[in-house]
Amino acid sequence: MDESYKMSDIVSVQVVNKDLFQVMATPNPSENGIFNLFIPLELAKENKNIAVYSQNMQLILDQKINNGTAKLDLSNHANGIYFLKVGSTVTKLVKTN
């Protein structure tokens, strides 16, 4: 029996939890258009602003992030689907009545 072994060049393996980079908006859907945003600190460090787009991709809001949290007020906008962008991360928001 041949018991030869081959050494690998791999020094370490890093597992990245994709959920750590997800933006959380609550409540979603929102009946009054007010969303509480929780942005992972790593994402908030790299991106100091959030942007909200309508379904036809018009920018309707540009707002600063404060320590990974923000309150988003879409109460003056029509019911529907909106897209929240933080860096390259996009989250769907739903405003209902």
Image (spheres, rainbow, N blue to C red):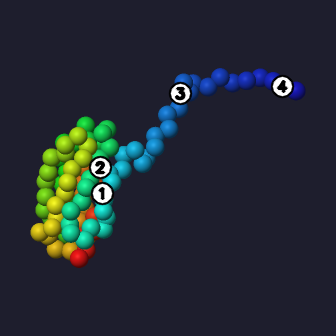
Q: Amino acid at mark 4?
A: Asp
Q: Where residue 59 appears, x then y in whole percent?
A: 14, 61
Dot 3 or dot 4, earlier in sequence: 4
Mark pair 1, 2: CA separation: 6 Å
Residue holding disc 4: 2
Task: Say left or right for 63 vs 80.
Answer: left
Residue at the spot x=19%, y=57% of the render?
A: 72
Mark pair 1, 3: CA separation: 34 Å
Q: Where residue 92 appears, x then y in whole percent?
A: 30, 63
Residue at the spot x=30%, y=39% of the render?
A: 41
Foreground disc of the pair 4, 1: 1
Helix, strand or loop at disc 1? strand
Residue holding disc 2: 38
Dot 1 or dot 2, earlier in sequence: 1
Residue holding disc 3: 12
Q: Is residue 45 visible?
A: yes
Q: Is residue 66 above or below residue 13?
A: below
Q: Give the quarter of the figure containing the N terminus.
A: top right
Residue holding disc 1: 25
Q: Residues within 10 Å of mark 2 (few under 14, many from 20)?
A: some
Q: Nearer the viewer, residue 91 or 37?
A: 37
Q: Amino acid at mark 1?
A: Ala
Residues under numbered marks 1 and 3 in contact, where contact means CB atoms less than 8 Å apart: no
Residues under numbered marks 1 and 2 in contact, where contact means CB atoms less than 8 Å apart: yes
Q: Give the quarter of the figure containing the C terminus.
A: bottom left
Helix, strand or loop at disc 4? loop
Foreground disc of the pair 3, 2: 2
Q: Which mark is residue 70?
A: none
Q: Is residue 53 visible?
A: no
